[in-house]
Image (cartoon, rainbow, N blue to C red):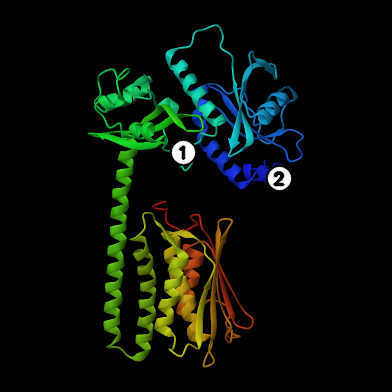
């Protein structure tokens, strides 16, 4: 099935600013579907003007859907085409006086133009089941009246609100609780769940008929929405209870006249508690990484002191060990500054290259080290051994590839399909003819052990106009990798 972007590109003549408006509508119209107990469909004219194509579909959480099958990408039914075409061409809403029979079901349809600037870009249709010989309850009636206001705002280009970024995991839904306010901020209706949320904040009196600002809790979000015509959101915290309030102004006309507001409320006490717990855990983890980094640097300093008292050959071995420790310490230093257990490995690799350059290369600059590619963020379980692997391969190239003539070492990194590939290529003398395995040298043995045993990857190398070592490892907890301790 085509994505929205593909449908827009292949089937329509929408401009980028129109697509941006429709994207905001799709991010916000779950609210309208829930308030209207209806399915929503978004139709856009085809490039050849032969009809309309369905760009998006939204099902309600408050009632059963009328369309269990996905309609996105389908063209309009003949019985609906005249309605949508009229709304699109006349820029005027339409509502069926009596239910239409579609696929054997009676369905009441309302069609709303979706104008963007001076042009109608699409048509939104609202599909609901007709009322069956019963009176609407107070909650249902208020839901539908709020839905009618929002639908009218869509038709006037006033909804969705420009610049409003919603967190779909956090944003309150209709079922969490709603409060309907008039222009003066008086509560015209509060759903049972909204009343319960306010009781957790200590409000025991009946809030219906009262000004929200007079009930004893922070009502600044509603006040801001009514005063400015701009949505507002706040957390109201009383004791251990936290209630999220999202206030949406009801607007009318070109002058964006405020006529009232809808306040969605959600008890987020447990959510905020878990967030605080997570923040504390992350702070502890960052402190642990900081202390590990300090301890590793202390060990490296002790090894440097020891190196001053040993023969030159032994000193070289100690310096290699110090660089391995420094590579691990660098990853921990990066993690001590992050809020997760992932690090920007391109940044780590760049610092490792500078460290090797400063420690091993002659100031005359005959050997240069370069980095290309960005594998993104890697979990510390992968980044730490991979940092050591990179240092070992760089040391190996700098010490053995060039002799007196100098050259270039190029590190490239890429990531795709759950795997990371890192190559270290030099234009030096190449590998010795008798080197057919990784048994030559402690550094290459360390690389082989880390890549194959700890990271569950592969290490290959070739010698053709220089040496090239290629490391390929899975990025999703390969065999031998410890369970991820963070996100």
Crowding near pointer 2: few (<14 within 10 Å), some, many (20+)? few
Estimate the x, y position of residue 366 in percent, counting from the top left. 50, 89
Left or right placement of residue 345 versus residue 106 in this view: left
**Local SS, label 2:** helix
Residue that sits furthest to the top in the current view: 133
| Camera-side residue of 312 and 363 | 363
Say above or below: 351 vs 29: below
Give the image quarter of residue 391. bottom left
Estimate the x, y position of residue 245 in percent, counting from the top left. 35, 33
The residue singled out by tag 1 in the image is 168
Crowding near pointer 1: few (<14 within 10 Å), some, many (20+)? few
For the residues marked 1 and 2, what is the alpha-carbon distance in whole angstroms?
28 Å
The residue singled out by tag 2 in the image is 10
Estimate the x, y position of residue 105 in percent, counting from the top left. 66, 16
Residue shown at the point (49%, 83%) measured from the top left: 398
Say above or below: 476 vs 202: below
Q: From the image, which quarter does the N terminus lie in?
A: top right
Estimate the x, y position of residue 180 in percent, counting from the top left. 39, 23
Give the image quarter of residue 139. top left
Of badges 1 and 2, nearer the viewer stands 2
Contact between labelled residues 2 and 1, with CB atoms less than 8 Å apart: no
Q: How many marks?
A: 2
Q: Is residue 486 visible?
A: yes
| Camera-side residue of 282 and 211 | 211
Residue that sits furthest to the left in the current view: 239
Give the image quarter of residue 137. top left
């Amino acid at each position: 099935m085509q994505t929205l972007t593909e449908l827009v590109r292949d089937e329509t003549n929408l401009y980028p600013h129109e697509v941006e408006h429709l994207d905001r509508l799709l991010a916000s119209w779950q609210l309208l579907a829930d308030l209207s107990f209806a399915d929503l469909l978004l139709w856009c004219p085809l490039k050849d003007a032969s009809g309309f194509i369905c760009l998006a579909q939204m099902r309600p959480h408050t009632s059963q859907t009328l369309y269990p099958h996905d309609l996105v990408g389908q063209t309009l039914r003949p019985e609906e085409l005249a309605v949508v075409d009229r709304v699109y061409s006349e820029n005027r809403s339409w509502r069926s006086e009596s239910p239409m029979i579609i696929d054997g079901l009676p369905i009441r349809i309302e069609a709303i133009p979706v104008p963007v600037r001076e042009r109608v870009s699409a048509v939104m249709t609202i599909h609901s089941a007709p009322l069956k010989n019963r009176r609407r309850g107070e909650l249902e009636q208020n839901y539908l009246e709020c839905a009618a206001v929002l639908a009218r705002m869509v038709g006037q280009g006033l909804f969705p609100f420009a610049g409003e970024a919603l967190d779909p995991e956090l944003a309150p839904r209709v079922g969490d609780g709603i409060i309907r306010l008039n222009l003066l901020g008086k509560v015209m209706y509060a759903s049972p769940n909204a009343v319960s949320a306010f009781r957790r904040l200590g409000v025991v009196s009946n809030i219906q008929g009262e000004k929200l600002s007079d009930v004893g809790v922070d009502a600044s979000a509603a006040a801001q929405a009514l005063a400015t015509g701009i949505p507002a959101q706040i957390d109201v915290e009383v004791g251990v209870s936290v209630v999220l309030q999202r206030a949406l102004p009801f607007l009318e006309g070109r002058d964006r006249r405020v006529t009232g507001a809808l306040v969605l409320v959600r008890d987020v006490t447990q959510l905020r508690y878990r967030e605080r717990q997570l923040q504390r855990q992350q702070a502890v983890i960052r402190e642990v990484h900081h202390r590990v980094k300090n301890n590793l640097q202390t060990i490296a300093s002790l090894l440097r002191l020891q190196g001053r008292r040993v023969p030159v050959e032994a000193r070289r071995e100690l310096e290699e060990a110090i660089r391995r420790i420094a590579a691990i310490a660098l990853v921990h230093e990066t993690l001590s500054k992050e809020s997760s257990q992932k690090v920007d490995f391109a940044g780590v690799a760049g610092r490792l290259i500078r460290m090797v350059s400063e420690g091993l290369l002659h100031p005359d600059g005959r050997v240069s080290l370069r980095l290309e590619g960005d594998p993104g963020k890697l979990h510390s379980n992968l980044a730490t051994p991979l940092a050591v692997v990179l240092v070992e391969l760089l040391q190996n190239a700098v010490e053995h590839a060039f002799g007196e003539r100098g050259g270039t070492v190029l590190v490239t990194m890429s990531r795709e399909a759950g795997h990371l590939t890192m190559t270290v290529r030099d234009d030096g003398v190449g590998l010795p003819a008798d080197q057919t395995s990784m048994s030559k040298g402690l550094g290459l043995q360390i690389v082989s052990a880390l890549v194959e045993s700890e990271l569950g990857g592969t290490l290959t190398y070739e010698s053709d106009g220089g040496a090239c070592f290629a490391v390929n490892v899975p990025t999703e907890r390969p065999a031998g990798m410890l369970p991820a301790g963070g996100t």
